[in-house]
Image: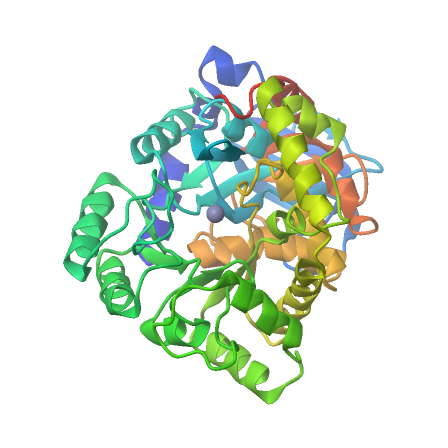
Amino acid sequence: MKNALVSLAVLALSVPAARAADSPAARAFATVREPVVVLLHARVIDGLGHAPQEGQTLVIRSGRIAELGADGAVAVPQGARVIDLAGKSVIPGLVLVHEHLFYSSFVQPALHINEMEFSFPRMYLAAGITSMRTGGSIEPYTDLQIKDDIDAGRVPGPKLHLTMPYLDGPGTGITQLRPVASAAAALRMIDYWADEGFTSAKVYINLPAEIMGPAIAEAHRRGMQVTGHIGKVSYGEAAQMGIDDLEHGFMAMSDFIAGRKPGDPSNSVGNYRSLEALNPDAPEVAALMKQLVERHVAVTSTLAIFETFTPGRRIDTPAELESLAGPLKETYLTNWAAMNAKNSQMAVHALSRDMALELRFFRAGGLLVAGTDPTGYGGVLAGYGSWRAVELLVEAGLTNVEAIQVATSNGARLLGILGDTGSLEKGKAADLVVIAGDPSRDISEIRKAETVFKDGVGYGSKALFDSVKGSVGIQ
Ligand SMILES: [Zn+2]
């Protein structure tokens, strides 16, 4: 990951800030483009878990945080654009790690996944996500092109870290996701997509141990990280193989299914039942946490997607529903009603147990990171769902500033870019979100994002969201 850090730093130095919004499409949303910008009287939440600091001045110069300190202690440069943030907060741009550039919808007769090359980059940036890792690709060349377009300033969006197409064994049953039959086939795929520019691999629910082990080794040899939404392989087994990150909190954990033998088929109902029965204070749970921490295996919280499968919880906000294309909105609402009519308590119990385990992992010193995972039956959307993912970390028991830490510096630490972004510190990229409220007091005020700065260029959140109304599901 050292190489990635170095190349990012080189990139940041060699690309002038003005290039960050260089097409009419990107420029239309860039409300702050001056080379020197001063944010005055701000409440600063640094993303490292520290208490908020009131009355701060932040100077942005050529895309970087040039100065940060108390009002009066930091000089306001001549000719700078000065923005008064009295009563407002600044947090680092979010760094989320289970993102997708596609939208999945259960349209009959089968699940179909559409690439959202127009709407999702805008929605992520609008919500304050300035860096993100995708969590598995369906249209890999589209993903690469979106990244190129964003990097060149042709399209507004976050800095992308791309994960190659899923590595899965047979049985998942999604036509757009082709399984591999052997370790040799998996290695061919890894080498091909590494050459094409992907920096992470994702192992999936039906990949067997005899392919996963060699795949992880090969991905590491190619300088890629490996994350997993696993099923056939337990968390403990994957940790021993050297996996870097486990997706979906502890919801995909098969380790405590009674009578499970290595190699048993992926069994999500079994996972849920075992979570229901699990005592989070049991010594075997503590032993697994210890193993994950010692082996530096991160865990990605994706609570927003599980909430949509939990009866009696939320429905999307009016703004989210407005961003959906008409027919997809109807499909989503029908699916949501059907899911809620099931009234199964299993999902309710599994969600609350997963929250308890994520909190324990974080308290045990584990690297808890967060993702939106805009999948399922279409209720979790880029940006809006990202905010929900952060709110649910607080419901799980993290403090507000800890939840912000998980969604900012922890993500950057996992991706190896913390030297460049993910916290508010002098010298780092000016990737930050101006919030017309105080998310350290009420986490839902994270939704009051006003301006999102990426490399020192400020983008209007509302205009970005407004520009995608009626698009999601189609483009
Ligand atoms: Zn996913």
Quarter in which the N terminus is drawn: bottom left
Q: Which residue is drawn at 66% across and 44% down?
A: 339
Q: Choose between 242 and 113: the one closer to the eye.
A: 113
Residue 172: x, y in percent?
A: 38, 51
| 186 to the left or right of 359 | left
Q: How many numbered circles are shown? A: 0
Q: Which residue is drawn at 26% across and 58% down?
A: 219
| 409 to the left or right of 450 | left
Q: Choose between 404 and 351: the one closer to the eye.
A: 351
Using the rendered view, name the quadrant where residue 30 is placed. Answer: top right
Please tell me whether residue 461 is drawn above or below residue 336 in the rendered image. Answer: above
Residue 361 appears in the figure: yes
Q: Choose between 305 and 274: the one closer to the eye.
A: 274
Residue 127 appears in the figure: no
| 447 to the left or right of 150 | right
Residue that sits furthest to the bottom in the current view: 283
